Amino acid sequence: MRASALLLAVFLCAAPSRAAGPQLSQVAEAQLSEGLLRLYSLDYVRSREAFRKIIESEPDNPFGYLFEAGGIWWQASQEYGLFKSTPALQGVFERDVEDALRTADAYIDSKDPRQKASGYFVSGMALGTRGQWSLMRGHYLDAYFDGRKAVKHLKKCLKIDESFSEAYLGLGVFDYQAAHLSGVAKLGILFGMKGDEKRGLERIQTAAEKSRYASAQAAGFLVSIYIIDMHDLSRALPVVQRMRRDFPSSPYYLFLELLLRHRLGDWDGSLRLGQEFYKAAEGDPAAMRPKWLTLICGLSGPDCLDPQDMERALEWIDHALDSTAKEPPSGFASLLRTFRGHILGVLGRRAQAEKEYRLALALPDFDDLHAQARACLGHPCGRADLLQYLKEMSRTD
């Protein structure tokens, strides 16, 4: 089900290519680029601000609403329980979807083929977004009917303009999910509309290769499929590396490459990326605080900090500590010791966790690590405590 949590998050920020649909204005294109850059930097507030500027300057343009809804959904897919803890943000998301559908209807009624194709595209994507929200809540029937209508609109978009490559992303996602997720698959059989996992992946790949604005979002979705569903980490790695090249300031894709290299056996390469990550965080630790929830829980959702992941993380930290044992005391070592204490606490190894916290307190502080260590020495920090702490740090309101 984690695939469903990620599914539309990565493609809702798509815009029509220059060969299909209306051209984005210079202002809208600039804000789209800024919004995506901030999104992958996990700076969710500034990402929404960029998309909101499109809405404010072009209120009749359905793409602005779609961009903002997509950014919110991506955040919700990465920050487990976001909508429940931030209902106001859920309200913005739902209004954006409705406004995207409303303004897309005016495009659909246009006699301009490019504008009509764009209207069907936005409507299809917005319906798919609403379907994802229903799917996350377990409302499979609502999700299926929205998805089915979304497919019809996206196919109409391509019938008007077969070069509208962005539409293949939405079609591919529905195809993949309808075949892959049991609840949706059963409904597909019931109503005579089946998905096709192979075709879905091919369509998403087409969007990744041929679309101008949606290629990064398609690539991001492929990463989630390869890692979460297929467990094909070697296939995911080059796509993650491409995203790092396209978004070099993204801690998200740096962290993903670190994780993939570790699990593929490149321990030293993974450690080098870990040290690179720390140096970036050291420059502005306060800015990193709201990002830890996405980095730690983004791939695992409700299973965040489960024992299997904690054991893997412990292996990485042990290797890092052994490899850097002769280096001078540092904030990096303090981070490793504090995180090791957290992991041991989650695993129920209290005495060992306390030892790690005391070792961390003897090292140079980094951000609020010493405060964390003292708090966990005074009160055992279990999984629920750490999840609550991560969620509190992620709040920016």
Image (cartoon, rainbow, N blue to C red):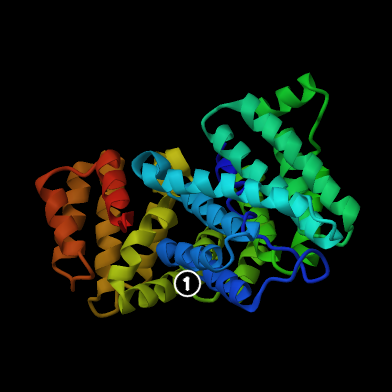
The residue closer to the viewer here, 224 or 79, is 79
- Where is residue 250? Give x, y as percent: 50, 70
Q: Is residue 154 above or below residue 51?
A: above
The residue under the point 89% across, 54% down is 160
Residue 97 lies left or right of residue 273; in this view the side is right
Which quarter of the figure has residue 90? Answer: top left
In the displayed structure, does residue 379 sit left or right of residue 52? Answer: left
Amino acid type of the residue tagged 1 in the rendering? Leu
- Res 204 visible: no
- At 32% across and 49% down in the image, what residue appears? 391
Please give left or right for residue 51 compared with residue 355 in the image: right
Whether residue 146 is visible here, answered yes or no, is: yes
Callout 1: few (<14), some (14-19), or many (20+) C-alpha neighbours within 10 Å? some
* SS at circle 1: helix
Residue 101 image point, x, y percent: 65, 46
Quadrant containing the C terminus is bottom left
- Furthest toward the left, the residue is 378
In the rendered image, which quarter contains the N terminus? Answer: top right
Give the residue pinned by disc 1.
Answer: 273
Q: Nearer the viewer, residue 288 or 122?
A: 122
Residue 86, given in percent of the width and then of the height, sits at 36, 45
* Residue situated furthest top in the rendering: 190
Q: Residue at image x 17%, y 56%?
A: 373
Nearest the camera: 257 or 167? 167
